[in-house]
Image (spheres, rainbow, N blue to C red):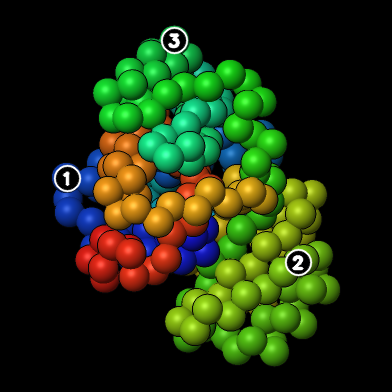
């Protein structure tokens, strides 16, 4: 489900209502601050920052917001101290969930994630109980209109990619965690724009879900978690057929 669901999520985000835009900007702002804190405020020297800036532009985030978030990361402006945390849990049907959080209050975010899971058919699990079902990888989603498969393969494989999937209207490129910056740089150098570029948790064990009601419960839980202010991303290892829920819900 990971490639298809990622592409679907991107397309839904592009058409998100203004009510959702504040959450999108909040996530990107935190990413900008963290990227600048860890690698400096010059995008030419900081591949991670350059990638997040591209994401900000794609979301039509105002330049002033981008500059302010970067300056908070470099210390030029005062700001809160963010930390990144990962929570593990299960949804309906034994589906594994990884919840990435960026927060200035660890206790608050832990409480919100635990409460949200409990109220929506899931449960928080101990550290390591779910993570072994996922691999930390670089994941790039690229619209097929911006490049052809042969060109992309030449560039990506040279830069350390380990898998390139042609899904028709988009390409999914996967690389080891350690090659993420190099691949980010290579795509930028060759002016290949990405719809999404991130260090993601990709499932190595899939949990088949053949019941539509169970699938809806898991998707609802993911959506509610994703709407929490501190949540950056939610990853699952649910495996469902594309036609199980119909076109509107897949």
Quarter holding residue 150: bottom right
Q: Give me the residue at 77% from left, 66% from top.
A: 162
**Could you say which is closer to the camera, residue 20 or residue 82?**
20
Marks 2/1: CA–CA distance? 37 Å
Residue 81 as seen in the image, left or right of residue 61: right
Residue 34 in view (yes/no): yes
Total numbered badges shown on the rendered structure:
3
Element at label 1:
helix
| Residue 42: percent from left, percent from top | 63, 48
The answer to whether the residue labelled 2 contacts the one labelled 1, judged by CB atoms less than 8 Å apart, is: no
Q: Give me the residue at 69% from left, 46% from top.
A: 135
Q: Give me the residue at 60% from left, 45% from top.
A: 201
Element at label 2:
loop
Residue 72 as seen in the image, left or right of residue 187: left
Marks 2/3: CA–CA distance? 37 Å
Residue 73 in view (yes/no): no
Q: Give me the residue at 44% from left, 16% from top.
A: 110
Q: Which mark is residue 161?
A: 2
Residue position for label 3: 107
Question: Which mark's residue is nearer the viewer, 1 or 3?
Answer: 3
User: Which corner quadrant holds the C terminus?
Assistant: bottom left
| Residue 74: percent from left, percent from top | 58, 31
Mark closer to the chain start, 2 or 3? 3
Quarter holding residue 212: bottom left
Residue position for label 1: 19
Mark closer to the chain start, 1 or 3? 1
């Amino acid at each position: 489900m990971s490639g298809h669901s990622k592409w679907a999520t991107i397309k839904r985000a592009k058409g998100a209502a203004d009510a959702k835009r504040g959450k999108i900007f909040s996530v990107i702002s935190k990413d900008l601050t963290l990227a600048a804190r860890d690698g400096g405020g010059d995008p030419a020297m900081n591949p991670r920052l350059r990638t997040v800036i591209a994401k900000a532009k794609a979301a039509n985030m105002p330049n002033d917001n981008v500059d302010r978030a970067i300056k908070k990361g470099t210390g030029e402006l005062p700001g809160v101290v963010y930390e990144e945390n990962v929570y593990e849990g299960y949804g309906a049907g034994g589906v594994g969930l990884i919840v990435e959080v960026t927060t200035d209050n660890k206790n608050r975010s832990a409480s919100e994630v635990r409460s949200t899971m409990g109220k929506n058919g899931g449960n928080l699990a101990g550290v390591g109980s779910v993570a072994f079902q996922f691999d930390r990888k670089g994941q790039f989603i690229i619209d097929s209109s911006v490049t052809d498969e042969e060109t992309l393969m030449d560039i990506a494989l040279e830069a350390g990619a380990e898998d390139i999937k042609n899904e028709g209207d988009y390409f999914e490129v996967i690389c080891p965690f350690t090659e993420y910056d190099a691949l980010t740089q290579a795509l930028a150098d060759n002016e290949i724009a990405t719809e999404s570029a991130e260090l993601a948790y990709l499932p190595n064990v899939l949990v088949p879900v053949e019941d539509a009601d169970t699938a809806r419960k898991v998707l609802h839980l993911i959506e509610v978690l994703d709407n929490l202010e501190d949540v950056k991303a939610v990853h699952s290892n649910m495996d469902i057929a594309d036609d199980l829920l119909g076109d509107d819900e897949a």
